[in-house]
Image (tube, grey):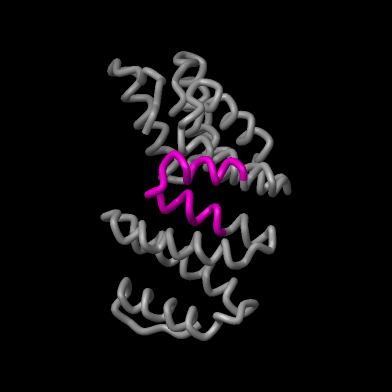
Amino acid sequence: MGSSTHRPTDDAFVRDYNHAVELGAAGDLPGAIAKTRGLCTRYPTDAAAWSHLSALLIRQKDYRGALAAAQDALARDPEHPNAHINAGVAARGLGDLETARRHLEEAVHIAPSDPDAQLQLGGTLVRLHQMYAAIAAYIRAIGEAHREEGRSELLIERSVDGLAAVTPSTPLAEPLRSLCDGVRWLTTGEPGSI
């Protein structure tokens, strides 16, 4: 992915990073944030730790802190796709849609097969009233999500929901509704209707 950052491999780093991820997954955001801040202090050049901190702060809706952490990650590795995604989501949360779009487009450029990048770009383009571009991003997210084992259903569901929200305002509403129903049927086994 073009990462120029050397990732620490010592056991303490790996243990603490995994513990921070587990705390976040269990819903202990304050604990996960504290553990990740500690990693950022002990391993200040690790872009992944800064990016993870950004993602946790987004979950807490601390968009200013999240944007600062994402920018710290990007200062260490300008081609870190998750840091660009996090910067985009944080900027969108702050209402800066142009900065959000710029970061999300960069994430898509760096990692074109990342469905999260496409999904977040689609959501930002909707807010910018660029509906056809949003539709294209959601369709790319659906296509890429099919390639990812274990994550595809949630990503496809989010993409289809985003696509469904866009379609009523376009002349392509009926064919896109059918597409959404077909994708839901493929991923869940049950036909749906928007």
Residue at image position (54%, 27%) is 74
The one nearer the camera, 12 or 174, is: 174
Q: Position of residue 32 (x, y in %)?
A: 48, 34
The one nearer the camera, 17 or 7, is: 7
The magenta stretch is 102-122
Up/down of 166 relative to 149, above or below? below
Residue at image position (51%, 27%) is 78
Q: Position of residue 68 (x, y in %)?
A: 63, 29
Q: Quadrant of residue 91?
A: top right
Question: Is residue 114 shown in magenta?
Answer: yes
| Whether residue 35 can be seen here | no
Q: Position of residue 153 (x, y in %)?
A: 35, 63
Residue at image position (47%, 16%) is 45
Q: Main secondary structure of the magenta part?
A: helix
Quadrant (top left, top right, bottom left, bottom right) of the N terminus: top left
Residue at image position (61%, 36%) is 66
Q: Position of residue 107 (x, y in %)?
A: 49, 42
Left or right: 85, with 128 as reference point: left
